[in-house]
Structures are given as C-alpha cells and as structure tokens.
Image (cartoon, grey):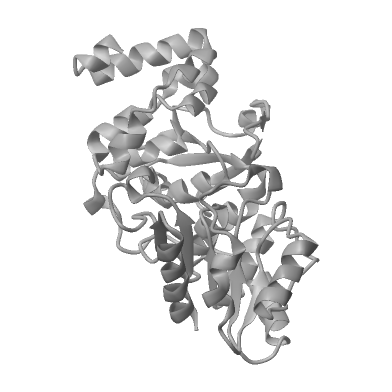
C-alpha cells in the first residue's frame, strides 16, 4: 500500500504478486480501489487497481509468468477465466485481441462455456478448468492437461486483458465481437418458437436463479406490468428455477401464460441457452448473466435494475455498457423510474 500511495504502481504490483506466491490468502486484502475508479471512468488507474482483486489469488505457480504487455509474437499464453459466468462473457470481448497477437492462446474457462467459446474462438484452445458457483465456491481442475499443449510463456487472467486492450473508452469497438451459437440448435429453437403462432417471442428473466440470493436490485414482478401488457406476443421463460407461484402470479395479475421449455436446463446447458437466445426476437431481464449472454449472441436486450449508475463499475462512467454498446440498460433508484424503464422496453420490443 505504501508503494501505491507513492505512485509506484508497477513496483507495488510486483511485490503483491511475490507475496501471493508465498501466501495466496493475501489476495483477500484487496481494498477494491478499482470499483470507484472504474465507475467514474478512470480506466487508466482503475485497471491498474483491478490487479489487486481477490480472484487474482488463482495465479498459483503462474505468478512469475503474468503477462505485463510484453510482445507476444511466437509466444503461448494461458488466459484464465475468472470470477463468474457473466464476467467471463463480458471479458470475452477482449479475447480476440490477444488471439491475434500470440502464436498460441489457451483459454481456461468455466466448464459450461467451453463449447460456446470453442465455436466462437476457433484459433484458440479452450479448456474447462473450473466451475464457478453463485455462492462463491470454485472447483478448479489440476493442470495436468497442460502437458498436451505448448509450454506456457505467459499467464493472463481474463479480467486483466482490458488493462492492455481497453485502456480508454475510445479503445472499445463500436460493435463487440459476437459469440456464435450452435446453428443446428438455433434452427431447432426457431422452429419450436414458430409453432407458438404469430407474434414476437420475448424472453424474460427477473431475478437470480437462487431464491435465497435475491437482491433489491431486481425489480419486483408487479413493476413489469407495462411489459406484460403487450398484446400479440409470446413471453418465453428464461428464468432458471421459476416457481409455480410466479407463473400463477403472471397469469392472475397480467393474464400472461408464460411459455416454459422444460427440456432445457438454463443453468447447466449454456450453449443451448445461447441458441435459444439467438432464436428470440428480444430479451428483457435484470442485472444477471443472461444480459451478457443474450447481448453477446446479438439478441436485442433490455436490462432493468434498481441502483445507481455510479456504483455500476462495468459501465465505466457511461450510461451504457461499453462492452456491448447495443445493450439497452435502465438502472434507476425508484419504482416510478423503473416503471418508465419497463415502458421504454415495452415500446422497444413490441
């Protein structure tokens, strides 16, 4: 901290990583300087502060190989997916940048994203290395599988890529690289949706899939009324763990019979979920990983949540998410403003 306070960020980072090699638990000393910096749009300082995030403890014996912007010509890089499904999809918008610079790129990601990433980044090697859960627990494989691949020259946590490839808002592309859904499953879901009859097909998800982890940022279902009042459309359930009481409430309060495809596991089968997203006309959700997945596939998305722009660091000081500029976002503090957001979404999807 003394080195940081004196502006010696690079020296501080080296010392921090050396300490992590001796005691990975020191990663929990992160004071999250990056959150307010990035939320204010201070990307230069914010990305450097982001290197102290607690997930950096996953460096392990790769501490001495962390990539710090060196030339990657002829080199092999292991990119380590971190944090969770939503963050891995968001940061995936930087993967093509490093793939174009290195000789070989090996991407370690959540097991559920492997197929989707293999299709989307065919020049890279994709390996399922971990399983990230909503309760913060992580199951990580050993590294014996690396013996089948070229030796690692550099190691790069996925969340560290923006430091080099997105140092300013201007460095974000106006259109993000898309993830590619399974074309056969895309056609399958297209046919399945067509059987519902005429009218647009709108996917909806309104909360976390874990009932015990509900947050005040998720707008209560009664606030969704203006959306569910749209006539002549089909609402498709994209909510994992939907319960009968919610289905009944929609029927009683809004006169909506939401379509539930029980054949798909929206948590475990993310590749098929991506294909279903691609077949929908649009998705309306809240601040959950679905907003990233649907946006990455290229489906029009409206994300509505309670909160403040200034506390949403992923927006990087903007009124939108630079990662996916087409993602329509409404983050408001009051019910009245949230209702207006749903009205705008209803107008946009109808």
Nearest the viewer among 155 and 58 is 58
x and y, in percent, of residue 277 in the image: 59, 68
x and y, in percent, of residue 238 in the image: 65, 64
Left or right side of 134 for 83: left
x and y, in percent, of residue 6 in the image: 19, 14
Residue at image position (55%, 52%) is 288
Residue at image position (68%, 79%) is 256
Nearest the viewer among 135 and 304 is 304
Nearest the viewer among 46 and 118 is 46
- Looking at the image, residue 344 lies above or below residue 305: below
The quadrant holding residue 323 is bottom left
The quadrant holding residue 183 is bottom right
- Looking at the image, residue 314 lies above or below residue 201: above
Left or right side of 330 for 25: right
- Quarter of the figure with the N terminus: top left
Whether residue 182 is visible to the viewer of this picture, yes or no, is: no
């Amino acid at each position: 901290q003394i080195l940081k306070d004196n502006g010696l960020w690079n020296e501080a980072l080296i010392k921090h990583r050396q300490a992590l090699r001796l005691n990975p638990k020191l990663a929990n000393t992160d004071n999250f300087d990056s959150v307010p910096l990035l939320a204010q749009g201070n990307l230069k300082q914010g990305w450097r502060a982001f290197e102290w995030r607690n997930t950096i403890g996953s460096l392990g014996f790769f501490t001495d190989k962390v990539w710090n912007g060196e030339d990657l010509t002829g080199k092999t890089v292991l990119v380590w997916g971190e944090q969770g499904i939503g963050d891995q999809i968001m940061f995936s918008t930087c993967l093509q940048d490093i793939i174009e610079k290195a000789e070989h790129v090996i991407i370690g990601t959540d097991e559920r994203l492997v197929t989707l990433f293999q299709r989307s980044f065919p020049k890279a090697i994709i390996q399922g290395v971990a399983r990230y859960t909503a309760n913060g627990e992580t199951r990580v494989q050993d590294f014996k599988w690396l013996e089948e691949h070229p030796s690692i020259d550099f190691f790069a946590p996925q969340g560290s890529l923006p430091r080099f490839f997105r140092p300013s808002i201007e460095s974000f592309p106006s259109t993000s690289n898309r993830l590619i859904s399974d074309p056969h499953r895309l056609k399958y879901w297209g046919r399945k949706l067509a059987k519902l009859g005429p009218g647009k097909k709108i996917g909806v998800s309104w909360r976390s899939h874990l009932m015990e982890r509900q947050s005040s940022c998720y707008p209560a279902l009664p606030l969704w009324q203006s959306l569910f009042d749209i006539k002549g459309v089909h609402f498709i359930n994209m909510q994992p763990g939907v319960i009968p009481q919610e289905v009944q409430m929609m029927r009683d309060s809004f006169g909506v019979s939401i379509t539930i495809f029980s054949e798909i596991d929206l948590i475990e089968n993310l590749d098929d979920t991506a294909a279903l997203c691609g077949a929908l006309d649009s998705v309306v959700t809240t601040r959950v990983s679905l907003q990233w997945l649907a946006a990455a596939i290229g489906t029009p998305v409206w994300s509505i949540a309670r909160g403040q722009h200034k506390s949403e660091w992923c927006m990087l000081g903007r009124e939108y998410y630079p990662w996916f500029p087409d993602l329509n976002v409404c983050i408001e503090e009051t019910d009245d403003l949230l209702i207006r957001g749903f009205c705008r979404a209803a107008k946009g999807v109808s």
